[in-house]
Image (cartoon, grey):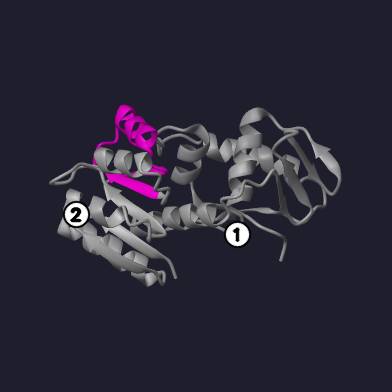
Amino acid sequence: MARILTIEDDPVTAREIVAELKAHGNEVEHIGDGQIGLDKAMSGTYDAITLDRMLPGLDGLAIVTELRRAGIDTPVLMISALSDVDARVRGLRAGGDDYLTKPFAPDEMAARIEVLLRRQRGSVPDTVLRTGDLELDLIARRARRGGVILELLPIEFRLLEFLMRNSEQVLTRTMIFENVWGYHFDPGTNVIDVHIARLRRKVDGGDLPPLIRTVRGCGYTLGAPA
């Protein structure tokens, strides 16, 4: 069970966040004021924080900036109605770990928190990622499956790294696009499906048991064969 601080002034959004996170077994504390939220977050006792961008008392950018200045490294998911690239960049550069725009699906919000928690718990950087017989060497920038080197393009390497860092986790197209490509997802594009298909041909080619799986209506996941 993770202890999560939700700093959100809109009561409807706050109820959605709290209910979804509690449904996933987390302990959630809700604060509706920016200054009070910062005071709580400065304790460093939370496993993750959901942080609204626009708040009374103190806005989200100021809060995350103060946290990082004080050496508090609690993962922060920033949530905002501001969806333009500049707003997202400012939030991430201020110290946010992820950025989600309103309106959002509560289950995606919970999935993003799970990713941040997994990343934090494995905060000692891994230089070699492994899933089954698939190996990704982050230093040598080399991928192997069953000892055979896979020839990956740079974007395919980044895509595979994101999938492997979050193995067994269902990743939505939005999560993949924003973490691998680094900007706002356009639901009208099929770029993710095209790159997943190319990566799948290289990772799961021949008679190999598939590691990359499509979760219909949700996105993709990578995991060891059943």
Image side of residue 38 versus residue 179, left or right: left
Label annotation for residue 96: none
Mark 1 and mark 2 residues within 8 Å of each other at the beta carbon: no
161 in the magenta segment: no
Decide if residue 194 is in sight here: yes
Q: Is residue 5 left or right of residue 160?
A: left
Quadrant of the drawing holding the N terminus: bottom left
The quadrant in which residue 109 appears is bottom left
Q: Secondary structure at mark 2?
A: helix
Real-space CA distance between mark 1 and mark 2, rounded to the nearest whole angstrom: 36 Å
- Residue drawn at x 46%, y 33% is 182
Q: Amino acid at mark 2?
A: Ile
Q: Is residue 90 magenta?
A: yes
Q: Which residue lies at the image location 24% right of the left edge and 62% below the top edge?
A: 30
Q: Identify the image quadrant of the C terminus.
A: bottom right
Q: Residues within 10 Å of mark 2 (few under 14, many from 20)?
A: some
Residue matched to label 2: 36
Q: Give the foreground label among 1 and 2.
A: 2
Please provide the residue range marked out in magenta.
76-101
Q: Nearer the viewer, residue 63 or 108?
A: 63
Which residue is at a point 35% across and 54% down the rendered structure image? 49
Q: In the rendered view, would you say 151 is above or below 123?
A: above
Label 1: state its secondary structure: loop
Whether residue 104 appears in this view of the structure is no
Reading the image, the residue beneath label 1 is 168
Image location (x, y in percent) of residue 69: 35, 39
Disc 1 or 2, which lies upstream in sequence?
A: 2
Task: Estimate the x, y position of residue 165 in percent, counting from the top left.
Answer: 60, 49
